[in-house]
Image (cartoon, grey):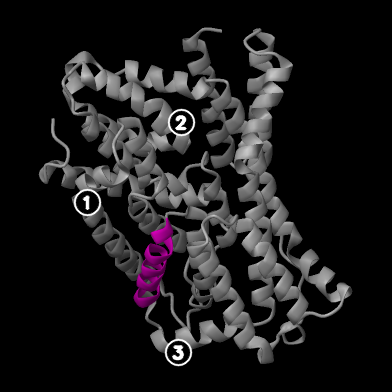
Amino acid sequence: MSEVMLAALGFASILMVIVLLLRNVTIPSIAFIGVGLVTSVVLIATGTFSVGEMGEFVKEGVAGVHGTAALFIFSVLFFGIMNDVGMFDRIINALVKKVGNNVIGVTLMTCLIAMIGHLDGGGASTFLITIPAMLPIYKKLKMRPTTLLLICVTAMGVMNLLPWGGPTMRAATVLGIEANALWLQLIPMQIAGIVIAVGTALFWGYVEKKRGAGINSTLEVEDYSELEETEEVDKEELARPKLFVFNVILTLSVILALVLLSDLPAYFTFMIGCALALLVNYSGSKAQNKRIKAHASSALMMASTILAAGVFLGVLESSGIMNNMATAIASLIPASMGRFLPIIIGVLSVPLSMMFCTDAYFFGLLPVLITVGNAFGVNPAHTAIAMVVCRNCATFISPVVPATYLGIGLAGVDIKAHIKRCFGWMWNVSVACLVVGIFTGVIQF
């Protein structure tokens, strides 16, 4: 199969996944598995790859996300147990008393927690720090969980530009320079992004307040969840008020370990946390088994989605389809527009993020565009900066980024509602950062 055909197959596959997800035709895991299977069959039928090679691609894809799947299972169990013992209830009540019906204060708090949590550059850990802490407050004030996710991903997209963040490091690697050197150039755009992120929190807090959200709100909050409900239990029976201090210390220890012990797998940290939480709060195998079963359905639902996404991405990446897609996109840029390459790719970064995972975007598309830009005298760093900053804004709304499913799973929001709420807003944020980059001279043409 020719490179053009491979690229066309890739675009068709991703478009089909997006259509299936946005039209609620099926659940995400089946969409990824089904489309991935069809793509594999086409590649085998045309003689492009053998069955054995496709099997290896699938293994590579699953290997790339199995850690995230395990992380989701044990993080859901851990925070589910902490909710069962009543730890969040006491914290929420204290916060609500402090902010009262100040909905805007809650959204601003969400933004600040997400920014601080993302200092380590880890999307999964930021979701795990921010969403479980804030979601109960949003529910109590009748605020929409989609708003929580929007504020969270906006803050994360801006903070992900730090030199130890994945995208900046990848772009610097392609350029052959130090990540810190690239970051120093894009600081004005990041500062603008931080201001926009805070403004996002204030604006959507005002929107929620205008809707009538607050302590005494009678609003009916939409249920976007695609997860199964956990079994109804008597909260008083499960609560462990006498162990409140222990549970707070345990939770803080888990969070600190996520931030400080980066060499330790995050899922292992939650495994230890789950074991200690169960042993101390619920004695006996019967009680412990019951708590695990109570949260198993939601944990396994999203873990299966993450693994299925890994299969799909493994087929597209390892087969070279994504690299061919990148070449095809670069070839569409007219020669007369060559010197405006950073602007063009900056504007298109958010839509492209819906099709390319992080590695394919920076290691596949960026080198091709740098080569194209060289022919028109475009500074490679300017192209890289436009791609890093503008794409980062939409990282955690992309259906081909596994961490996205961790975030929506924790918030109980389906992928359609998440993309519908965030896509347009994040595209505007991306373009705003690009404009700041142009006016401050960070990006020139």
**From where the camera sits, is residue 77 visible?**
no
Q: Which residues are magenta?
A: 104-120
Query: Label 1, label 2: how many angstroms apart (C-alpha)?
Result: 25 Å
- 324 relative to 268, above or below: above
Q: Are there few (<14), some (14-19), or many (20+) residues within 10 Å of tag 1?
A: some
Task: Tell me, yes or no, whether the highlighted magenta stretch contains residue 395.
Answer: no
Mark 1: secondary structure? helix
Task: Tell me the element at label 2.
Answer: helix
Query: Which residue is labeled 2 in the image?
Result: 360
Q: Which residue corresponds to the image point at 31% horizontal and 60% vertical from the top-left? A: 197
Q: Are marks 3 and 1 in contact (CB under 8 Å)?
A: no
Residue 228 point in image, percent of width and height: 71, 58
**Residue 139 in sight in this render:** yes
Q: Position of residue 318 (x, y in %)?
A: 57, 25
> As drawn, is 376 to the left or to the right of 196?
left
Residue drawn 35% across the image and 64% down it: 204
Indicate the amino acid at tag 3: Lys
- Give the residue type that dot 1 points to: Ile
List the residue tagged with mark 1. Answer: 187
User: Which residue sits at x=34%, y=36%?
Assistant: 171
Q: Quadrant of the C terminus?
A: top left
Local crowd size for mark 3, using a 10 Å CA cut-off: few (<14), some (14–19), many (≥20) = few
Disc 3 or 2, which lies upstream in sequence? Answer: 3
Q: Position of residue 443 (x, y in %)?
A: 17, 38
- From the image, state whether disc 3 or disc 2 is nearer to you: 2
Q: Residue under circle 3? A: 97
Mark-to-mark CA distance, 3 and 2: 47 Å
